[in-house]
Image (cartoon, grey):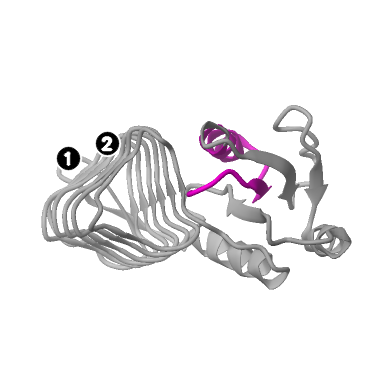
């Protein structure tokens, strides 16, 4: 995030608070939140919460210029497909989605990080890692050298991807999990919190335990 900007976030819960903190530490600020849940009326002090796609489009139509604004999608967990879809919606009204990186994150100069990614407090993105759009590397997580992450991935707090791991689209790596080197995590899979993954994970399954084994089919 090269300069202070005014931000619009979709999602009005915990992840919005985390992003607002990172944005503020770079001199930016969040001025409006959007959410589909009409029961959510407050998240950040003094920041209004508007509801739904039509509210976003109406708000955007009232702005004199969106060039000084940027957007973020504050939805975590195993909702990578939702993050990608909402990002497309926000782009359709003229909002850019830059990388949001906490100032304590360590990001290699050779890492490639796509638009809309979040790299949060004390996270590490190591040499030659590649993060697809709308991917989250949460607090204290490590994405080691030459890992390849698809779109809409969430690497939860305190988890570790050892070197050369391939993570396909819309995967959730649970808090404190470890994925050993040179493995593949299939599209839409979930790695349970605290698990140690020692072999490839198929698409759209849940694995859990030490070593991680398949528990059930998902989505």
Q: Please state the extent of the stretch shown in magenta in the rendering.
A: 1-23
Furthest-top residue in this view:
45
Q: In which quarter of the image is residue 92?
A: bottom right
Q: Position of residue 59 (x, y in %)?
A: 84, 57
In terms of depth relative to the viewer, which is nearer, 17 or 177? Answer: 17
Q: Residues within 10 Å of mark 1 (few under 14, many from 20)?
A: few
Instruction: Find out whether residue 189 is within the magenta segment.
Output: no
| Secondary element at tag 2 | loop
Determine the CA span between mark 2 and mark 1: 8 Å
Marks 2,1: beta carbons within 8 A: yes
Q: Position of residue 97 (x, y in %)?
A: 56, 59
In terms of depth relative to the viewer, which is nearer, 23 or 182? Answer: 23
Q: Which mark is residue 154?
A: none
In the displayed structure, does residue 97 sit left or right of residue 63?
left
The residue lying at 59 percent from left, 33 percent from top is: 17
Q: Position of residue 18 (x, y in %)?
A: 53, 35
According to the image, label 2 marks what residue?
Answer: 194
Question: Does label 2 or label 1 sit earlier along the sequence?
Answer: 2
């Amino acid at each position: 995030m090269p300069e202070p900007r005014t931000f619009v976030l979709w999602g009005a819960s915990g992840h919005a608070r985390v992003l607002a903190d990172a944005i503020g530490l770079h001199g930016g600020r969040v001025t409006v939140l959007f959410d589909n849940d009409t029961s959510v009326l407050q998240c950040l002090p003094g920041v209004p919460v508007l509801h739904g796609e039509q509210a976003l489009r109406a708000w955007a139509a009232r702005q004199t210029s969106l060039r000084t604004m940027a957007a973020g999608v504050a939805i975590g967990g195993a909702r990578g497909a939702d993050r990608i879809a909402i990002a497309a919606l926000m782009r359709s009204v003229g909002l850019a989605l830059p990388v949001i990186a906490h100032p304590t994150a360590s990001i290699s100069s050779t890492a490639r990080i796509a638009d809309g990614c979040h790299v949060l407090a004390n996270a590490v993105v190591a040499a030659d890692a590649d993060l697809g759009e709308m991917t989250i590397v949460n607090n204290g997580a490590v994405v080691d050298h030459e890992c390849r992450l698809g779109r809409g991935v969430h690497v939860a707090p305190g988890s570790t991807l050892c070197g050369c791991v391939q993570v396909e689209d819309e995967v959730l790596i649970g808090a404190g999990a470890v994925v050993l080197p040179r493995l593949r995590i299939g599209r839409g899979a979930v790695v349970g919190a605290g698990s140690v993954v020692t072999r490839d994970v198929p698409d759209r399954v849940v694995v859990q335990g030490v070593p991680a084994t398949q528990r059930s089919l998902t989505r």
